[in-house]
Amino acid sequence: METKNYFIVQYNDKFGDGNNTTFECIVKDKNDFIKWLKKHNEEREADGNEPEGEEEFSLIPIGLANLKADLFFNSAPVSRNPLTMDYNVYLFSCLVKLYDKSFASQPYDIQFDVIHGYYHQFELSEFNTEDKGLYECIIDYLKHHFDNNTIGFKGNY
């Protein structure tokens, strides 16, 4: 299986006693880290804390499976709060796993990160109709895309 490099952001407690290292998040590259650090510092300052500098963190490279769903990380706006999963997204997730074994074998946090993008593409598609139930609409969508090997490609609804 093909892999793609990502980075774990590790806080190093550089100015403390060095015993409070923590993993903060996973980012795709240095630019994503800079964006994350800016947001992180805005939250710290809002709580009355000093901002942290780049030197207080390490980027640890890791290889993760290169899912077709990687296309959604930047290309698909998420229509719901990405920290929640409602029944519709959960159902969609369960059904995708029946069709995409490589997706099903990924760690749950990776599945959770990308499934909202998958679902958003379904929401925009011609298969998401009012004349059938959600389950039937999703099955039709997945059959179409997996039969044509187009799942995950923006614009191929």
Image: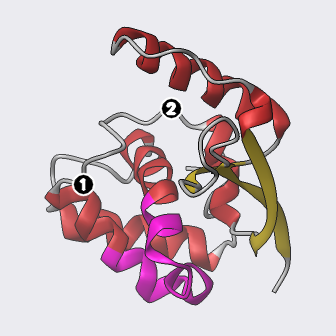
Q: Is 57 positioned to the left or the right of 144 in the image? A: right
The residue sitting at 40% across, 53% down in the picture is 119
Magenta-tinted stretch? 94-112
The spot of residue 125 in percent (x, y) is 44, 45
Q: Are marks 1 and 2 in contact (CB under 8 Å)?
A: no
Residue ID for mark 1: 85
Relative vertical location of residue 50 with respect to residue 17 in this rendering, above or below: above
Mark with earlier residue (1, 2) = 2
Locate the N terminus and report the quarter of the image it occupies. Answer: bottom right
Element at label 2: loop
Give the labeled residue for mark 2: 77
Count neighbours of disc 1 (C-alpha within 10 A) and say few if under 14, some if 14 to 19, many if 20 or more: some
Which percent across, then down, holds residue 13?
62, 44
Query: Disc 2 residue type?
Result: Pro
Q: Amino acid at mark 1?
A: Met
Give the overall secondary structure of the magenta segment: helix
| Residue 30 visible from this viewpoint | yes
Asked if the stretch drawn in magenta spans residue 6, the answer is no
What's the residue at 44%, 74% (across, down)? 108
Decide which of 62, 114 is in the foreground and name it.
62
Task: Give the secondary structure at mark 1.
Answer: loop
| Foreground of the two, 120 or 126 | 120
